[in-house]
Amino acid sequence: MSERDVKKPETRDDFLKMLTEAVKKELETRGIRRGKPTKPTVSGTAKMLNIHRDTLYAWLKEFNVDFKQFSEALSAKFPSIGDVEGSTYLIGEALIGEGNEVAHVDLLIGDKDGPVGEAFAAGLSHLSMGHTPLLAVVRPNLPPKPHTLLVPKVTVKNLEDANKIFGPAQAAVAKAVADAVEEEIIPKNKVDDWVIICSVFVHPKAKDYRKIYHYNYSATKLALKRALAKYPSLEKLFYDKDRAKHPIMGFRVPRLWRPPYLQISLDIPDLERTKKIIAQIPRSDRVILEVGTPLIKRYGTKVINQLREVAKDKFFVADLKTLDVGKVEVDLAYEETADAVVAAGLAPPETLNAFIYEAKRLGIYAVVDMLNVENPVKKLKTLKEFPEVIVLHRGIDQETGRTIGLELIQELRRAFKDKRFLIAVAGGIVPGTAREALEKGADIIIVGRYITQSKDVERAVRDFLELTPEMREDIDLFRVHVE
């Protein structure tokens, strides 16, 4: 076909449709589907349309289309696949549904001549008792493309189990793959080059064939979308990892790299009263619970586990104020599920080094409290190991109501700018001093009596949680899991 045979579009919509097809074809031809992200060009698109680029420029002007803006929007719909030139190797996962019919799918997508293709052939030719792989088919004699190998996760023990796999699960996976191609989730020009391995969970007690099909179709479709989009992004992962709750585990394990936080010091040596205080604290990802020294001295470190009965998702700090045998005391707190443990900055460097090393080895936070330390910067420079949290602290017996040690926040930042750590402030903190500390760069505000001795614990906590936009946004959140 020559340029003379290419008719000029009559309307802007006709032109946009023609342009879309040409840009998509150019992107595919130039290899975006094999891990080579690129941008469409006017010349390349004109070539796909079989017209001169000057003709395309004229049409763009006539129909008022910004080629750069148009092509960028379209390119965003074509995620690059594969990190390096060579075999495609993509991974997807999805959990959908509820009850015994719940579906969990793990899958691999890749080239026939790559590692996924090798695994596909090996799975089809090396059978395993109770986990026999089978080709997914929409109906007998009608497999989808790319060809898909279904692998049962749960051991197939009898004909009833086999019927669920060879019936609704097999059909659901096959239909999801076929629909994904039709909807251009999977590029059509790859259906003969790629294969899919799909690992499927079907509970032995599942009974409802319609739900088995329904959930496995949705899970496969979602896993395919995620694989092609390289889900999750690091931003998504980092944001959710400390907020997520695994449904089977049943509780969250938060970390502390999204300050600011409010740390409530539970110093009252009365277990039942402390539990009642915890029960009144409003829900917030910004709240940390400190098991205070008096409470630990009365009940021992086992009190941490006892407090988890009423706050299983909370981040617990064991305020041991360790001065000696650093490793031993870290182990004591760790065995009782503490998330962080506190040593006194007055301890010898050898003790602090052992303390911090052991905490990091076990994966919990090492906190050093600078109460009565004359020169915190100098003391920290003597250490081989650096803590995750440094506490600038005025003791209860020293409180005068004045703001304390806030000038040290920036001094610590400057002195240890190559370190990643949080700075906490403690000692007679009230909302006014807390606001000042946050403005000067504090990451954690440690509050005790203002909250624990308040007649309205909830209101006292909110006085602090409402100090910053970040803390306000995290109060009383009902999280809806959306992908």
Image (cartoon, helix red, strand yellow):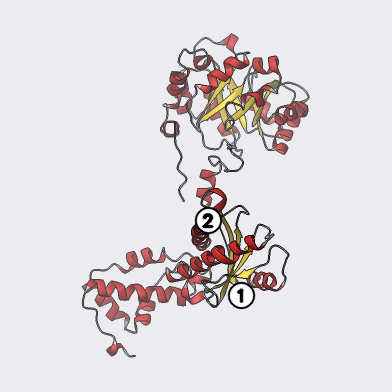
Q: CA distance from mark 1 to mark 2?
A: 35 Å
- The tag earlier along the polypeptide, 1 or 2, is 1
How many marks on residues? 2
- Which residue is at 65% across, 63% downward? 159
Q: Which residue is mark 1?
A: 112
Residue 210 lies left or right of residue 318; in this view the side is left
Q: Looking at the picture, how far across and down is residue 86, in whole percent? A: 60, 72
177 or 81, which is in the foreground? Answer: 177
Q: Looking at the picture, how far across and down is residue 122, in whole percent? A: 70, 71
Residue 451 vertical position relative to residue 284 in the rendered view, above or below: above
Residue 249 lies left or right of residue 466; in this view the side is right
Of tags 1 and 2, the one toward the viewer is 2
Looking at the image, can residue 108 be seen?
yes
Residue 298 vertical position relative to residue 338 in the rendered view, above or below: above
96 or 1, which is in the foreground? Answer: 96
Looking at the image, can residue 394 be seen?
no
Mark 2 is on which residue type?
A: Asp
